[in-house]
Amino acid sequence: MSESRVPESRVGVWLIGARGSVATTVVAGCAAMTAGLHPPTGMVTETDPFSGSGLPALSSLVFGGHDTMDCPLPKRAEALAAGGVLLHGLPTAVGAELATADREIRPGGPVPGDTRDTEELVAAFAADMRDFVRRHGLARAVVVNVASTEPAPDSTELPPSSLYAAAALRAGCPYVNFTPSTGLHHPALASAAAASGLPYAGRDGKTGQTLLRSVLGPMFAQRALTVRAWSGTNLLGGGDGAALSDPAAAAAKNAGKERVLADTLAAVPEGEVHIDDVPALGDWKTAWDHIAFDGFLGTRMILQTTWQGCDSALAAPLVLDLVRLVARAQEVGLSGPLGELGFYFKDPVGDGPSALGEQYAELVGFGGRLGALGASGASGHASAPLGASGACGASGASGALGASDPPGASVAAAEFGELGAREPQEPRVPRGLSGEGR
């Protein structure tokens, strides 16, 4: 007699900026690995230390999202293949999966002329997320912001990234901010995030220059070499290059790069990072670093590095890692900021280490904890899939922000009340729309 099998729970991945380069690469890459067309290169969660963590299988992931753009995913994938980001022929091989994900993408916002106020936008986005979970009978869904970088907010109005973050809380979905944009970091969402009972992680994925800095900074400190200056230049194209040509958006991006040096060197050396938009580079980027340091007896020396990489191909496996880790964290009952995922971010939540080696050790320990919690049955959450109830996850998101809120209920009513969400107001479209994701 054949052994009966428990059906595999499916996990939703709701991407903000779902038609951008990173999101397209995430969907195409997951489909390619599931079909055995390519090994999981770059996926840390597919390495041995995480084999017992109980992470959801790649084959269990279901994709959807929001975007203000209308370019279909198959067409975007063809453009990425033409630019050398995806393998030639891959868009055709995974065309069905791309088309399926594309049908799950809903209009984002706000867009020019949008008359919806803050509450209406959040309610609409949350309804899309709940509907996605309900229709597919998902055990849970993780919302991931992979949209283009927006400037830091200059008013109390919630920027687009925070609208989507608030919607994730409203829908009961764990949230990951892979961008330097505000997201859950907005003061108006602090109490809502704490009350939600949901795990969340971010921010600003560490894929290139800052990844290298998190290795080199500790090296100089551990060898007692004094860094006098550290200057850098980034050349990049694509949606990120265009977005970061805005000085305010670039400033948000550079803040995370400086934090790594401040934490690993105990002080920020003189020097700046310049970001130049070079449209001809497409999805490729070049990062140069010039490091001036003092050796024994004050001997002056220089280290220069060049990093050339494809932003989407660097980011996509990390996004898949984060989805699996955060989904598992919710499954076993964890909530709040997941500082143990600092390995993936320039500006991580919490007070964890900034050196890459220490961050990796924390991540491996976290993977072991996820496995142990699942094995001990100490998750403390309802195990039934929540497709019927319409919530995105199994832990306590049905309180102040729950899926059972009546239509029009406010996300963190106190915060949204002072932002005028309950009163009609002239529409003002913030800079940094979600369209043309990273």
Image: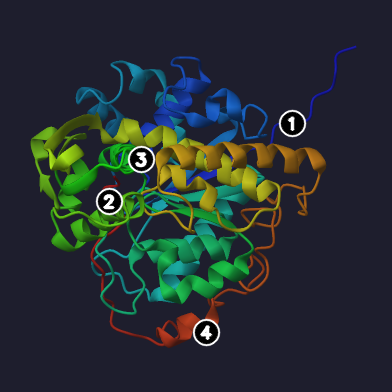
Numbered tag placed on residue 257 in the rendering: 2
Q: Is mark 2 on a helix, strand or loop?
A: helix
- Quadrant, the N terminus: top right
What is the CA distance from the residue labelled 1 to the residue labelled 2?
43 Å
Numbered tag placed on residue 414 in the rendering: 4
Q: Where is residue 423 in the image (x, y as percent from the top left)?
A: 41, 88
Type of amino acid at the residue the image marks with label 4:
Ala
Work out which residue is located at the far top of the displayed protein and give it: 1
Q: Name the residue under label 1.
A: 7
Q: Is mark 3 on a helix, strand or loop?
A: helix
Q: Which residue sits at x=29%, y=40%?
A: 220
Type of amino acid at the residue the image marks with label 2:
Lys
Lower sequence index among marks 3 and 2: 3
94 or 412, which is in the foreground? 412
Numbered tag placed on residue 417 in the rendering: none
Lower sequence index among marks 3 and 4: 3
Q: Which residue sits at x=63%, y=47%?
A: 329
Is residue 54 among what the camera can see?
yes
